[in-house]
Image (spheres, helix red, strand yellow):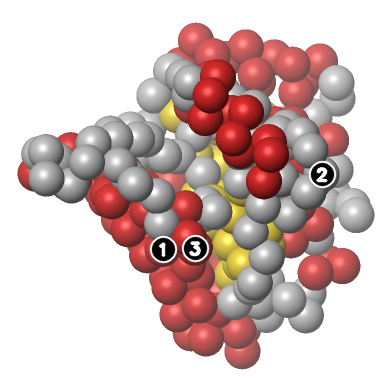
Amino acid sequence: MSLSGRVALVTGASQGIGRACALKLAEAGAAVALAARNQEKLEELARTITANGGQAATLAMDVGDEQQIKSGCKAALEKFGKIDILLNNAGITRDQLVMRLKRPDWDVVLTTNLTSAYLCIQQVIGSMLRHRWGRIINMASIFGQTGQAGQANYASAKAGLIGLTMAIAREVGSRNITCNAVAPGFIETAMTATLSEDLKRKALEQIPLERLGTPQDVAHAVAFLASDEASYITGHVLNVNGGLFMG
């Protein structure tokens, strides 16, 4: 699955799933624009990619800020001349039961996890349309498919991403641009590290593959959807959950 000659923009690239995806896309041959708030981590990742013969640039970007999205995408386009692959990966949680969920915690999760994806798509779609080739990949979640107590904001945002994925797939399919979502289950990241051992144990009991996923498991799925081999797949939600949710 060669991505040689392609340019990818990855949001939330500084750690976890985003970092693993950026590394995998670079390994496949894509030049990668790395976007996140933590510039130090981005610089370390860029050094790793270039040390392995890849090409990377860093973009200090808070996807909760529309102006930073616009300036960051503009910088990436100026640097590489185009963006072929967009991975909307950046996301946060602000968990609370709905009766106690504060409006600011609702708003920030929807803005970061859903609105930012729409804004990033809007900024790069022109490049994809001009080149008549594009891959848009949105990082959804199993909880956008099943819901989750205490995560009304997060589940709503991830379900919204799935709807956005299908709408964009219909809009731009005739221009050889695909739009798909990846829906991870329980993945070993900093976000899931805060879960209680009891919750992790209960989750493992329900996973047919009897293990948590790794960021690399998700990265392989992303790289496939970004490739020419996935050219006839669009509007699809690719589950990476060990069988926890089937449907």
Q: Residue furthest right?
A: 1
Q: Position of residue 37 (x, y in %)?
A: 39, 24
Q: Residue 99's image quarter?
A: top left
Q: Nearer the viewer, mark 3 or mark 1?
A: 3
As drawn, 158 above or below 130: above
Choose the circle earlier in sequence order: 3 or 1: 3
Q: Examine the rendering and report whether any part of residue 216 can be seen.
A: no
Q: Nearer the viewer, residue 226 or 56?
A: 226
Say which label, 3 or 2, has the lower sequence index: 3
What is the x, y in percent for residue 213? 72, 36
The kind of residue tagged 3 is Gln
The amino acid type found where label 1 is placed reads Ala
Q: Residue at x 52, y 86 (%)?
A: 170
Q: Which residue is mark 3?
A: 145
Q: Earlier in the sequence, mark 2 or mark 1?
A: 1
Q: CA distance from mark 2 to mark 1?
A: 25 Å
Asked which secondary structure carries label 2, the reply is loop
The residue indicated by pointer 2 is 209
Q: Residue at x 41, y 39 (%)?
A: 91
The dot on residue 159 is 1
**Image spot of residue 71 (x, y percent):** 34, 41
